Image (spheres, helix red, strand yellow):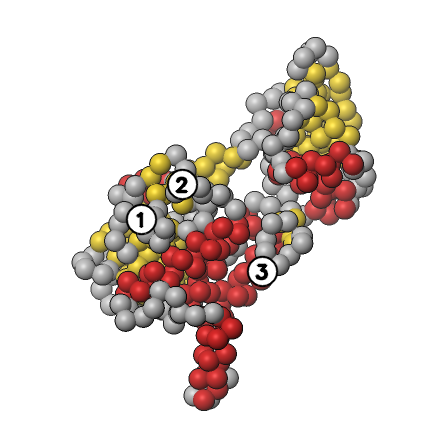
Amino acid sequence: MSATGVELFDITIIGGGPAGLFAAFYAGMRRMRTKIIDSLDKLGGQLVALYPEKFIYDAPGYPAVLARTLAHELIRQAIQYDPTIVLGEKMQRLVRAGEGEWHVETDAAVHRTRTVLIAIGGGAFTPKRLPVIGADRFEGRGLYYFVDDLQQFRNQHILVIGGGDSAVDWALNLLRVTHRVTLVHRRDQFRAHEDSVEKLRASPVQVYAFHELRAVDGRDRLETATIFDNRSGQETTLAVDAVLVNIGFTSSYGALRDWGLQLDAGGIVVNSRMETNLPGVFAAGDITAYPGKLKLIATGFGEAAIAVNHAKALIDPGSSVFPGHSTTIVPKQRNAARGRGEV
């Protein structure tokens, strides 16, 4: 594929999740010609692909917000400056095309850009499957790894498997549509946030600590789940309408490993400017690795702003890394647009 004649962008953001969307907004505010590329068929990243009905509690400005709502607001913010959006294309290669230019090659096109910002979260996620009897048979018919619509569980008895944030959050969120929620965890200590665990213990959710799932059964749909005490081996069979599995994900960086980036166990190694080892290539969000890194949406926003500002200074050395506060920048831009008759 040839990039001849293809428009040259100032920054191309790989990933349409929270960090990528905020980066697109900030790049627009810096008057950068911006493109977003994502392999999914819609923007929002994991917020819409993995847990749209889950509440997010650590997004600034929201005491609690549905993941799909947060994604909607981030998208609305990002498109203010009309970035070019490319969906459904899988990244294949990142090629240096001379001084100050990169080619992002996907399975469908070649995209020319002066700088690149990689914001792909933890990579491609696949849920860990249950190694129990009957699991494959009932997947999608009573056994679920994702929740697209919470209403499908209204007034049902739901069994939640896991002890991390996702499991505890789902157990609590399900109480919005049903009062019959049971949680099974192989230990009595949870990996979830302390506040969530306290809410769980104070809720009507029935918790089976030191228990694991042994088998699921039913006719056309899942009807029963057999759990066992991992200390004594004693089994209990529960009549349930659905089992929601939250035992973790496996992630893959895919073609990213062949791009010449410095990687470690945490992701792409970056410095304090969010620069990778490749000139003009930045990273932000959960994919980044540096001392003290916290994989939170909140930190991803800050990293996105840092990366964009340094990318701007790289392609326009006369500009300042710190452009000033948005309370000053945005009103000036809007006044200038009114003067040009654009608004």
Q: Secondary structure at mark 1?
A: loop
Above or below, 266 relative to 72 = above
Of callouts 1 and 3, which one flags the residue occurring earlier in the amino acid sequence? 3
Q: Dot 2: few (<14), some (14–19), or many (≥20) neighbours within 10 Å?
A: few
Check residue 291 in the rendering and tell me which mark sits there, or answer none.
Answer: 2
Check residue 331 in the rendering and tell me which mark sits there, or answer none.
Answer: none
Q: Secondary structure at mark 3?
A: helix
Residue bearing the label numbered 1: 276
Q: Is residue 186 visible?
A: yes
Query: Which quadrant of the rendered structure holds the N terminus?
Result: bottom left
Q: CA distance from mark 2 to mark 3?
A: 32 Å
Nearer to us: label 2 or label 3:
2
Q: CA distance from mark 1 to mark 3?
A: 29 Å
Residue bearing the label numbered 3: 72
Q: Residue furthest top?
A: 232
Q: Residue furthest left?
A: 98
Q: Residue at x 38, y 72 (%)?
A: 31
Splitting the image into 4 quarters, where does residue 340 fall? bottom left
Query: Which amino acid lies under the numbered mark 1 shown in the image of this protein?
Result: Thr
11 with respect to 199 (left or right): left
Above or below, 206 relative to 327 = above
Nearer to us: label 1 or label 3:
1
Of callouts 2 and 3, which one flags the residue occurring earlier in the amino acid sequence? 3
| Residue 270 point in image, percent of width and height | 35, 47
Q: CA distance from mark 1 to mark 2?
A: 14 Å
177 with respect to 86 (left or right): right
